Image (spheres, helix red, strand yellow):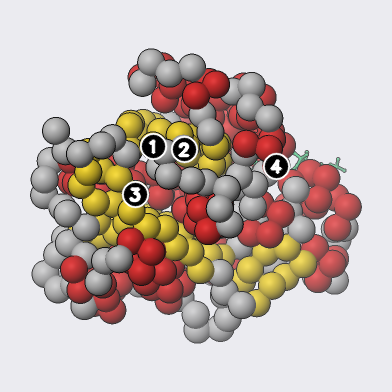
Amino acid sequence: MIHSRITGTGSYLPEKVITNFDLEKMVDTSDEWIRSRTGIERRHVAADGETTVDLAEQAARRALEAAGVAPADVDFIAFGTTTPDLVFPNCGTLLQQRLGCRGIPAFSLETACAGFMYALSIADKYVRCGESKRALVIGAETLSRITDWKDRSTAVLFADGAGAVVLEPSAQPGLLSTHLHSDGQYKDLLYCAGGVSTGIDGRLTITMAGNEVFKVAVLKLGAAVEEALAANGLDRSAITWLVPHQANIRIIQATARRLDLPMERVVVTVQDHGNTSAASVPLALDVAVRDGRIKRGDLLLLEAFGGGFTWGSALVRY
Ligand code: ACO
């Protein structure tokens, strides 16, 4: 039986950093409010002209180098983003051209903060059925482009970045399971106004009912982690690391409590990255792999929740 396994991780953050103190000069807020409500201290923001695919290319090259895979040998690209460079061609195809892996299937999908989980789940299936031998999975965003920098309720949360993993076939289990969900009844709680078929009408920015999003996120993520464990017949105590979506430290703490997991076993990057949507989980994963916390053989529980609502989990033997 063929399994898929993560053989390399990579990430990239744009150089420009905006701290909470910088934001104090832009909107009516305070470092104390942002840190205590969200855990965020700083975030990275793309430079003028720097695009989602620019960030993704750096992350992809780092992941490929870690896996020992030549860019031209990638045979499948699944790219999660809600902030694409163009309406089309899609970001996966733009990245495929830059990496020089010609003619392969490459696409992007837009499931907000769950974009990487969706891309990972699809790539896993292609590897397991033998159709892909070196799949590249990306989560990358330039959310700063759809953030209203005058709206304090959202400007303090969102940020830019990219993360990537390489999936290859393995005789040993790597990805044990993925579970994906969506529920469009919540669309008015978190959305980006404006689009191609509805028209932009001068507005293309995130609107969020933060409090309501918070409550549903805690509920759905709690259920999602239970679902992942039950599907694999595993107990909570088996998890080595929780690698959660980095939206808000209080949501992360609530999920850790549900798992009875001390915060020492949770990868937290929200203080440095802010909410980078689809990039958040692969960014956090790469940070913990590179600083040596996550080791081969560890059991990882990845989860994300975002606009739609969309959400999902992956249980991974790293
Ligand atoms: N600075 C200072 N005060 C603020 C700010 C700010 N930046 N933003 C809001 N406030 C004020 C509000 O106006 C309100 O004031 P009032 O009591 O006088 O009316 C007060 O602070 C409390 O506001 P709440 O919205 O109730 O604050 P809350 O504790 O819920 O925190 C937050 C807000 C951080 C947005 C939280 O609700 C949250 O994190 N929600 C979840 C977000 C999330 O998980 N998103 C995930 C998906 S993102 C995606 O998919 C792209």
Q: Are marks 2 and 4 in contact (CB under 8 Å)?
A: no
Report the Cα–Cα distance between label 4 and label 3. Answer: 26 Å
Left or right: 76 in relation to 120: left
Report the Cα–Cα distance between label 3 and label 1. Answer: 9 Å
Q: Which residue is mark 4?
A: 249
Mark 4 or 3, nearer chain start: 3
Report the Cα–Cα distance between label 2 and label 4. Answer: 23 Å
| Number of the label disc, if any, that sits on residue 298 | 2
Q: Can residue 79 be seen at all in this image of the molecule?
A: no
For label 3, the SS is strand
Report the Cα–Cα distance between label 2 and label 3. Answer: 12 Å
The amino acid pointed to by label 1 is Arg
Mark 2 or 1, nearer chain start: 2
Q: Are marks 2 and 1 in contact (CB under 8 Å)?
A: yes
Counting from the top left corner in percent of width and height, residue 117 is at 39, 44
The amino acid pointed to by label 4 is Ile
- Circle 1 residues within 10 Å: few <14, some 14–19, many ≥20: many
The amino acid pointed to by label 3 is Ile
User: For residue 256, what is the image quadrant?
Assistant: top right
User: For residue 249, what is the image quadrant?
Assistant: top right
Left or right: 2 in relation to 190: left
Who is closer to the viewer here, 181 or 100? Answer: 100
| Number of the label disc, if any, that sits on residue 317 | 1
Q: Quadrant of the C terminus?
A: top left
Q: Can residue 132 be seen at all in this image of the molecule?
A: yes
